[in-house]
Amino acid sequence: MRERLDDARFWTLLAATALTCLAILLPRVTLTRDVYDLLVIVDITGSMTTRDMSVAGKPASRLDAAKAALERLVADLPCQSRLGLGVFTERRSFLLFNPIDVCADFAPLETAIQNLDWRMAWEGDSMVAKGLYHAVEIAADLKADLVFVTDGHEAPPLPSGGALPEFEGTPGKVLGLVIGAGGTDKVPMPKYDDDGNEIGTYGPMDVPQENHSGPPPPDAHLRPGYHPKWAPFGSDVPQGEEHLSSVKSEHLAAIAARVGLAHADLITSPDLLSAITSNAHPRPVEVAVDIRPLAAALALALLVALYAAPLIARRIPIGI
């Protein structure tokens, strides 16, 4: 009997039996974990069709890369988190649906994200700062944190001097993240006809290179053809690179700071979950966790070790 008690195999079998009993009898354990309420607004303006990103190793548009990242986010968020979806174009953000449970409503969430399309845009302009400000208002009404995905390409460009529009809300009332989509190199933007067929890329004459809605720049009087009343911006066609596009990281960081949000670029921060949860309000919830599978798994591991160890020992040659 003494030899049996000293036998390690007996104690291993006894431990496995005890763990098996625990796997049958253990009740669920109540734990507290953090979940999140998010509103995601996605830029669907024309520059988001620029193909300077990649998905699964293949070239992809900024919009497709954003959609892929959001699908991963929905899958990674803890159950009982809620996510709402909207789109931005022109100067406004539009709410598609209020935040819904990411687990119970996973299928409609995933389908809605997959079906986001640039053809849903109602105007061609892209006043990103104003769209972000409006998105903050919507998120505040929903009591949700904001995730605003855009390349930051303002069209038409900001007025002379690059002054940002005034934000009339309270900075920091809404937390969240502005996510920049796109590469850092300036590349041509795809051009489409009225039927949505791609017909090339935009050239310098296809887009406004300068914003004439505000006062002219200080050096306007030096421009050819300048007249204070009839030609305050001069008579020559403005030159610029507004027909080329890249992620406007500095601009996005500036407008994010103005409303109290954080900023990250998708190309350098593909893990949206950690970036968002670091800049969002956690909502603690109680969940019942079934820990019986853990005890059963430990029992199985002990049984495998019990019967596999002699076989392994016989196959390992004894060193000299």
Image (cartoon, rainbow, N blue to C red):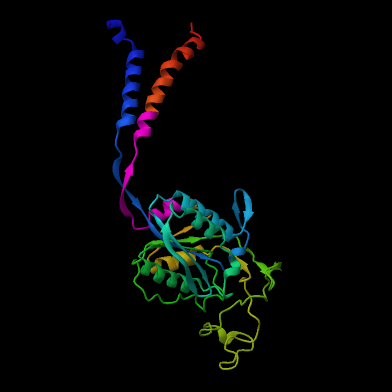
The x and y percentages for residue 136 are 41, 69
Q: Please indicate whether residue 202 sits to the left or right of residue 175 in the image.
A: right
Q: Which residues are magenta?
A: 272-296
User: Does the rendering let one see residue 184?
Assistant: no
Query: Is 29 located above or below residue 116 in the figure?
Result: above
The x and y percentages for residue 35 are 36, 53
Q: Residue at x 43, y 72 (%)?
A: 133
The x and y percentages for residue 276 are 41, 55
The x and y percentages for residue 142 are 37, 66
Query: Is 234 located above or below residue 62 in the figure?
Result: below
Instruction: Please state which of residues 76 and 157 is positioned toward the viewer in this rendering.
Output: 76
Q: Residue at x 49, y 9 (%)?
A: 314
- Which residue ends up furthest to the front in the rendered image? 24
Instruction: Please state which of residues 52 and 1 is positioned toward the viewer in this rendering.
Output: 1
Residue 209 is one of the magenta-drawn residues: no
Q: Residue at x 54, y 57 (%)?
A: 111
User: Does the rendering let one see residue 170?
Assistant: yes
Q: Give the quarter of the image for residue 177.
A: bottom left
- Which residue ends up furthest to the right in the rendered image? 199
